[in-house]
Image (tube, coloured by chain):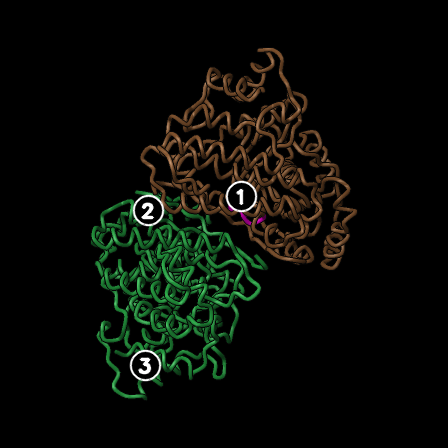
Chain colours: A brown, B green
Amino acid sequence: MQKFDYYTPTKVIFGKGTENKVGKEMKKDGAKKAYIVYGGKSAKKSGLLDKVEKSLKDENIEYKMIGGVKPNPRLSLAREGVKEAKEFGADFILAVGGGSVIDTAKGIAHGVANPDTDIWDFWEGKAKVEKSLPVGVILTISAAGSEMSNSAVLTNEETGMKRGLSTDFNRPKFAIMDPELTYTLPDYQVGCGVVDIMMHTMDRYFTDLTDCQNDLTDEIAESLLRIVIKNGRVACKNKEDYHAMSEIMWAGSLSHNGLTGLGAPMDFATHRLGHSLSAKFDVAHGASLSAMWPHWANYVKHKDIERFARYARNVWGITEGTDEELADKGIEATVEFFKSINMPTCFSELGIGIQDEDGLRELTNRCFYVKGTKVGKLIPLTEEDIYPIYVSANK
Amino acid sequence: MQKFDYYTPTKVIFGKGTENKVGKEMKKDGAKKAYIVYGGKSAKKSGLLDKVEKSLKDENIEYKMIGGVKPNPRLSLAREGVKEAKEFGADFILAVGGGSVIDTAKGIAHGVANPDTDIWDFWEGKAKVEKSLPVGVILTISAAGSEMSNSAVLTNEETGMKRGLSTDFNRPKFAIMDPELTYTLPDYQVGCGVVDIMMHTMDRYFTDLTDCQNDLTDEIAESLLRIVIKNGRVACKNKEDYHAMSEIMWAGSLSHNGLTGLGAPMDFATHRLGHSLSAKFDVAHGASLSAMWPHWANYVKHKDIERFARYARNVWGITEGTDEELADKGIEATVEFFKSINMPTCFSELGIGIQDEDGLRELTNRCFYVKGTKVGKLIPLTEEDIYPIYVSANK
């Protein structure tokens, strides 16, 4: 292990019925006027919002709500939230939902605390977050890991850019996680979550490991992957399996709080490839990742064939073959697993087909936030690397 | 996974030379007048304290120091520190050392923030910590995990009681970890640290698992144990192996920050058995644990033979035999490992021999903070359970 910083101040409150504690937790953090962010109707229909309202009323916390957050959350809604929350005088932002809701809440928190800055400036790197409001989370989707992570992703629908922002001000104060709240998710979303959780770890695991040897980080990453795969198979068949859903939920948080990549740089090229796809076609984040990873992996594997062989051995239990053969078998096993949980592994399985080079060039260009930079660490990818990866996926 | 809380707000700054950042980190936490706690001469001789002083001066942080903290840290020194730090007007406590120094610093922080309470009242449960001063850590010994943990252990030398206090106010603000700072430790202390780290995980791993199934927790615990064992063998031969020392250092923090036991109650009977021994004979904490664990394990193994068999398989790679045989082989492998790193596995190897029943009864009684309670979870131990465990160790 060489150098790293690790900072995960989020208090996790995990287990059945923990959502009823939300008012008490917010009180501890000094909340008096809360702005609540949620997604669709399910939070209302399931009775979750009623529970939240009761818990806040019990603690004399005033609140106002905004719903309608969609996957690949829009900048415009976050801006609207900033305006409303400011007018309301909010001192706390509560997210009730999954990654998109949480990321929108983070954006609103930054906006309220910095009234003179347009929040997209933070995402574009034109301004730096130096203060924010506290954010609390009641998690209803195991996937993004945003409930403990330092990142938040928004899509600017005017420019078609989907971008992440990393700052410790993105770390929520608390995350309430009740696996039962995830029972009502659509099957497709459970699958997307499993992929997303895997990819948060794999985008750290496959990276430039020059001068890095991180035994504990690597073994935790491999353990987490094995567990998500094992419980993912169960969860995709029975969403009411408390054990499987709870393992996936906790793995989702650990996968993206930093723990699974300590001591090495983060690659995250597959995330970038997927973001470009999601911003253009509005496909689900997890699905964009499963569609891109195999093509990325086949393009870069030669750079560290031992790593891909180790992945096959330690994650998939494949032991026979040369390192080259093991690497291929590990990638193939991943593809088969994605298919088995109905996740796409190429564009056509996503319902997308791009007919001309221009379309693929557009996706490629969108991966580069700043012209002339490179994407990823295992192989820092140029436009000439990324284009053939999209060509490979476009089948 | 059933229910758990997980809260680890400590910021970890890991890597070579990170001790030079201490002033900057303290500044971020608002420190103006720091009270520095350290142990023996090595912190001075090695030049570490000089670096700390320079870093604080660079940030215009005033400071005062107290040295002389010894293993099994004394309440009296902590009380002296409280008095001095109060007079100095300290607003921050900095620990430069290992678990004993950190625990003393935690005690001082509680004392300064609560001037009307004698700190031992917190340890005896007569008063509750509701506020404290911030504590920062520069870690020089990988062992106790106190740099991220919610616990602190002090010994009241007047009554001969060694007790732990668990509260989130014990979580340090930051922990600076430079593995190179551990190169100068005596061999014996490296071995003690390896045992201590293992036992923080094993005292969570072997517990009452009724209604608990924690895949991720268990696999992280097993990974951590394998890595500490592997790198412990290397470190005990070459303390200047950066890789081995860094893996052990990070494992030490994760082993006791909560991660390796989430979703199940904590047993910690071996710790209690060891504390009694340390308080009476002033033996090193790690040595007290290796001397007690095998005897505890043999006494309780029948309660969950499958768990002990799994431990043998997943930690030691032993695969042949019935569950009963595997359990025994796993315990035996642990004993052999302890011996291989010169750690004691019974009283005589600790240099202790108790001739009469009264001596063993005294050790037994000391395990019970409150008469009539029980110790541990796998089997909640009464005095009639603990006495034969000490008899077994007394050889």
State the residue position of label 1. A229
Mark 3: amino acid:
Val
Residue B210 in which image quadrant: bottom right
Give the image location of residue B94, x and y in percent.
37, 56
Would you say residue A252 sits in the magenta stretch? yes
Task: Look at 39% across and 35% down and name the residue there.
Answer: A309
Q: Are marks 1 and 3 in contact (CB under 8 Å)?
A: no
For image coordinates 31% across by 65% down, the residue present is B332
Q: Are marks 1 and 2 in contact (CB under 8 Å)?
A: no
Q: Is B309 located above or below residue A139 in the figure? A: below
**In the picture, residue A307 is in which quadrant?**
top left
Query: Mark 1 — on which chain does it sit?
Result: A
Between marks 3 and 2, how big is the CA–CA gap? 45 Å
The overriding secondary structure of the stretch rendered in magenta is helix
- Ranked by sequence position, the earlier of labels 3 and 2 is 2
Asked whether the residues under marks 1 and 2 belong to the same chain, the reply is no
Same subunit: marks 3 and 2: yes
The N terminus of chain B appears in which quarter of the rendering?
A: bottom right
In this rendered view, identify the residue nearer to me: B201 or B150.
B201
Which region is colored magenta?
Answer: A249-254
Please give the count of numbered marks on the rendered protein: 3
Instruction: State whether residue B317 is above or below residue A381.
Output: below
| Disc ID at residue B19 | 2
Q: Residues within 10 Å of mark 1 (few under 14, many from 20)?
A: many
Foreground: A190 or A67?
A190
Magenta stretch contains residue B368: no
Three-letter code for the amino acid on which mark 1 is drawn: Ile
Judging by the rendered image, the residue that carries numbered circle 3 is B391
Disc 2 is placed on an element classified as helix
